[in-house]
Image (tube, rainbow, N blue to C red):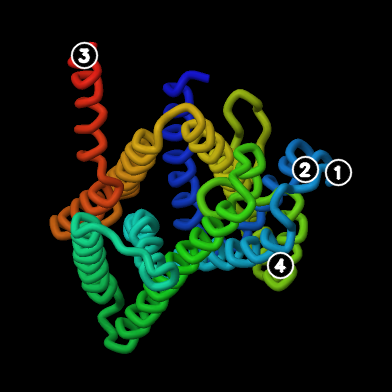
Amino acid sequence: MHPAFAVGLVFAGCCSNVIFLELLARRHPGCGNIVTFAQFLFIAVEGFLFEADLGRKPPAIPIRYYAVMVTMFFTVSVVNNYALNLNIAMPLHMIFRSVSLIANMILGIIILKKRYSIFKYTSIALVSVGIFICTFMSAKQVTSESSSSENDGFQAFAWWLLGIGALTFALLMSARMGIFQETLYKQFGKHSKEALFYNVSDFLNPGKMKITELLFFIFLASDIYDHAVLFNKSELYQVPGIGVTVPIMWFYLLMNVITQYVCIRGVFILTTECASLTVTLVVTLRKFVSLIFSILYFRNPFTLWHWLGTLFVFLGTLMYTEVWNNLGTSKGQPQKEDKKN
């Protein structure tokens, strides 16, 4: 499959997924649980039918290890989506989720006792400064946009602080999950086809284990039902090309689920067709495009300080992946070969 097709899937799927998530969150900020449930249900059915072969195909890695990852991923997904209900703007949400590599590096130093170059430590400093700038400026906006009542302003700021705490927890939990996954691959080897459905850090989640994972949503059933009722009460929307009329919130949810699947497929195809450097560049650029679109289309407040913080975050992320060094190496290789010839 041509890499350009995979890049198209990543940009079309991932960018549109963010759009539909923000459309959902703007109407009902607390809809994170029903969104997560719908995504998990879709992947469970698809994975159980096509990857797990109706449960007859055993995974290469024992289920008990996947059970641990499933629990961690469920927690991360719910907390990440619920953060949108805690006065967290979508741009700040995206910036926080763009520093997963750095969080993984920090936990790698603490847990695996890894050591890195000064270049990578500098990247951590840049990302930390960028996050601090964006977070600090967002805090000022929360207090200024709140009611003139001092009590209401403090309450809004307190919820925002809780949202920042939730995003930080989810970020670190996701990084810990990545380290756990790394140790499993060293023990049992990498299985590319199975990884599409059993990898819970960046791509999809287990087809079979998703069925078990859905049981976790029993604890969230009341909230999911309440939002389903609210979705039913939304205005009707005629789906283009089909002519079917449905409540618009259900249409947004359906498109969110479909685009998430397209995004995930695109990233997986890209990893099989391109070098890791290309994948990193495409994913980083996609996140930046999503951020710009969210700011311009939804008119999210974004000051010059936010832009500076965002620049630090993405520059630090690119430094961490050693993009410039790898590009220089790849350009130098043909010259060396020519000299040999």
**Crowdedness near tag 3: few (<14), some (14–19) or many (≥20) residues, C-alpha within 10 Å:** few
Is residue 305 depicted above or below 193 in this figure? below
In front of the other: 143 or 245 = 143
**Three-letter residue code for mark 2:** Ala
Pinpoint residue 274: horizontal percent, then vertical percent. 43, 29
Give the numbered dot on residue 52: 2
Quadrant assignment for the C terminus: top left
Residue bearing mark 1: 56
Residue bearing mark 3: 338
Depth-wise, is mark 1 or mark 3 nearer the camera? 3
Depth-wise, is mark 4 or mark 1 nearer the camera? 1
Is residue 162 depicted above or below 7 in this figure? below
Label 3 to label 4: alpha-carbon separation: 59 Å
Label 4 to label 2: alpha-carbon separation: 21 Å
Of callouts 4 and 2, which one flags the residue occurring earlier in the amino acid sequence?
Answer: 2
Is there CB contact under 8 Å for labels 4 and 2?
Answer: no
**Three-letter residue code for mark 3:** Asp
Give the quarter of the image for residue 242: top right
Give the quarter of the image for residue 115: bottom left
Label 1 to label 3: alpha-carbon separation: 53 Å
Residue at 84% x, 46% y is: 55
Label 3 to label 2: alpha-carbon separation: 48 Å
Of callouts 1 and 3, which one flags the residue occurring earlier in the amino acid sequence?
Answer: 1
Of callouts 4 and 1, which one flags the residue occurring earlier in the amino acid sequence?
Answer: 1
In screen coordinates, is 75 left or right of 97?
A: right
**Three-letter residue code for mark 1:** Arg
Of callouts 3 and 2, which one flags the residue occurring earlier in the amino acid sequence?
Answer: 2
